[in-house]
């Protein structure tokens, strides 16, 4: 339920972007912020939320996150302007960051058998498809009946129900040795991601050579350098750089960024195209994306079963090919592109995304000591959200930079660069899948796990 309401919020808001644009007079960059304000906060606080859950109690943290997310949804429905809507999306993101890390930690520590865990993560990944399926249709119905503000109301009963169900079914648990807070690392992560996303989104408006944009990118680079210098010197860092000695873990991070950047960019461009260019209603646009969602639901658990039996290599390679092909199919998009071609691209993209999502988390935690699995999964989740945020930012800015007039009349030609970027994200998934799923990669994972266990083992007495 936690993954569904967070995922639902992403897809349902995408469908509402044209309605929000009309009522709040939002530019394209404003629409990017409506999406990215939520995702960016989600990404930057995921790891912190996981460690808070370990220290303060997972059920308590989970219920607090549900409450904040639900209140944030209510506030979004009341937002009087674009600025307030973006601010309330930040509140939603803070609550959402407390949900998925705790739930994934439960899955990883409950299913200790490799095959069972892969299947469980596959079912978990299928919830993404459920949210993809529900979001556009539910959003379309709500927009058609009560307006775009209604899209945030759907989170309220689900959030309240999840709070009650958590109280009934989830026992309280606290990690025996919770990780210490790392405020310096947390601040550096926020600065790094926020400054680069701000620079990408606002670059077309302010000018790529302006002092403000160059300063943003320089600040992001400085924060990254600070993380690289600071984190290895902390006893319990927020971002454990030792994990990146494992090629599968590093590959999972790149694959997460690439695949979710493709998803964010695909949904952003597609909803504007269907409603602003082809003139479909929000409901019709939502129904158009059902094939994408249905195929994602089908392939996610299938991917989990394949990983359990044969490892992640095959799903990763097929996913990379599918994502690349789906983006490339739309690089020649026109106002009259045949419906069959559109639906085919949705099906191919859904197959690729359904195959890749379970592979990311499974690859990230594979070979890690069980004590580190939760942290590894949290970093993988952070990479997913950071990738989606960057996808919306980069693809949206590519669109804005090439617009030559009103969105309705110049969108088609301006969107071509964005579809090429999405195809490039698929190539990144394919290349990382090839390089990090072979024998050499498995050897690096085994060495990394051995080092982690030996570095954390107590010294012998006497």
Image (cartoon, rainbow, N blue to C red):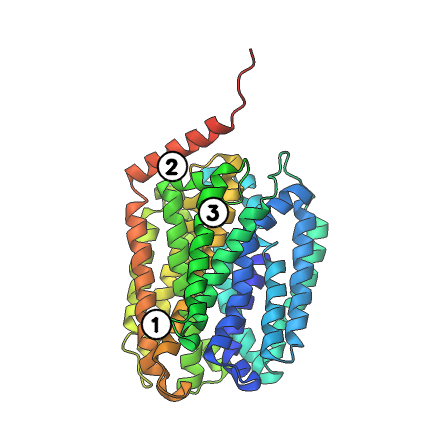
Left or right relative to 329: residue 139: right
Residue position marked by numbered label 3 in the rendering: 227
Left or right relative to 372: residue 431: left
Query: Picture quarter containing residue 243?
Result: top left
Q: Position of residue 83 (x, y in %)?
A: 59, 75
Quote the CA–CA distance across marks 3 and 2.
Answer: 23 Å
Q: Which mark is residue 202?
A: none
In this rendering, which labeled residue sits more in front, label 3 or label 1?
Answer: 3
Left or right relative to 395: residue 324: left
First in residue order: circle 3 vs circle 2: 3
Mark 1 secondary-structure assignment: helix
Considering every residue shown, the one lying at the far front of the view is: 211
Front-lying residue, 342 or 264 = 264
> Is the residue marked by circle 2 packed among few (<14), some (14-19), or many (20+) residues within 10 Å?
many
Mark 3 secondary-structure assignment: helix
* Whether residue 4 is visible: yes
Number of marks in the rendered image: 3
Residue position marked by numbered label 1 in the rendering: 418
In this rendering, which labeled residue sits more in front, label 3 or label 2?
Answer: 3
Mark 2 secondary-structure assignment: helix
Considering every residue shown, the one lying at the far top of the view is: 462
Q: Position of residue 98 (x, y in %)?
A: 61, 54
Quote the CA–CA distance across marks 3 and 1.
Answer: 31 Å
- Residue at point 67%, 50% (across, down): 61
Residue position marked by numbered label 2 in the rendering: 445
Q: In which quadrant of the rendered image does the C terminus lie?
A: top right
Q: Position of residue 227 (x, y in %)?
A: 47, 47
Quote the CA–CA distance across marks 1 and 2.
Answer: 35 Å
- Residue at point 64%, 62% (across, down): 69
The reply to whether dot 1 and dot 2 touch (C-beta < 8 Å) is: no
Query: Picture quarter containing residue 322?
Result: bottom left
- Residue at point 58%, 49% (across, down): 48
């Amino acid at each position: 339920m936690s993954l569904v309401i967070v995922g639902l919020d992403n897809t349902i808001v995408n469908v509402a972007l044209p309605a929000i644009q009309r009522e709040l007079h939002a530019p394209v960059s404003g629409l990017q912020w409506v999406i990215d304000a939520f995702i960016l906060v989600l990404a930057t606080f995921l790891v912190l939320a996981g460690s808070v859950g370990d220290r303060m109690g997972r059920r308590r943290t989970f219920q607090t996150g549900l409450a904040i997310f639900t209140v944030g949804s209510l506030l979004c429905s009341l937002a009087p302007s674009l600025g307030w809507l973006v601010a309330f999306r930040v509140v939603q993101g803070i609550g959402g960051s407390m949900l998925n890390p705790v739930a994934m930690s439960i899955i990883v520590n409950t299913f200790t058998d490799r095959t069972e865990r892969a299947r469980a993560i596959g079912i978990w990944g299928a919830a993404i498809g459920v949210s993809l399926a529900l979001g556009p249709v539910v959003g379309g119905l709500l927009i058609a009946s009560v307006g775009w503000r209604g899209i945030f109301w759907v989170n309220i009963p689900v959030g309240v129900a999840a709070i009650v169900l958590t109280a009934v079914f989830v026992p309280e648990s606290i990690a025996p040795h919770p990780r210490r807070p790392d405020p310096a690392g947390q601040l550096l992560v926020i600065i790094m991601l926020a400054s680069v996303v701000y620079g990408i989104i606002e670059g077309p408006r302010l000018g790529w050579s302006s002092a403000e944009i160059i300063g943003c990118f320089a600040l992001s680079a400085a924060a990254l350098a600070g993380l690289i210098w600071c984190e290895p010197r902390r006893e319990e860092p927020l971002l454990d750089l030792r994990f990146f000695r494992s090629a599968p873990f590093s590959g999972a991070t790149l694959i997460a960024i690439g695949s979710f950047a493709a998803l964010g960019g695909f949904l952003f461009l597609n909803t504007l195209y269907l409603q602003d260019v082809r003139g479909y209603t929000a409901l019709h646009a939502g129904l158009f994306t059902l094939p994408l969602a249905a195929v994602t639901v089908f392939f996610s658990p299938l991917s989990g079963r394949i990983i359990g039996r044969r490892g992640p290599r095959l799903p990763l390679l097929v996913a990379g090919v599918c994502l690349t092909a789906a983006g490339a199919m739309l690089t020649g998009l026109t106002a009259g592109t045949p419906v069959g071609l559109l639906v085919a691209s949705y099906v191919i993209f859904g197959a690729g995304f359904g195959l890749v999502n379970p592979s990311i988390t499974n690859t990230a935690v594979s070979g890690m000591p069980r004590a580190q699995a939760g942290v590894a999964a949290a970093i993988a989740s952070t990479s997913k959200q950071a990738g989606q945020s960057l996808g919306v930012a980069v693809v949206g800015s590519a669109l804005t930079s090439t617009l030559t007039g009103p969105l309705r009349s110049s969108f088609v030609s301006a969107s071509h660069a964005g579809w090429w970027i999405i195809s490039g994200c698929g190539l990144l998934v394919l290349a990382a899948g090839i390089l990090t799923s072979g024998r050499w990669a498995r050897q690096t994972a085994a060495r990394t796990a051995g080092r982690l266990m030996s570095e954390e083992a107590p010294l012998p007495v006497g």
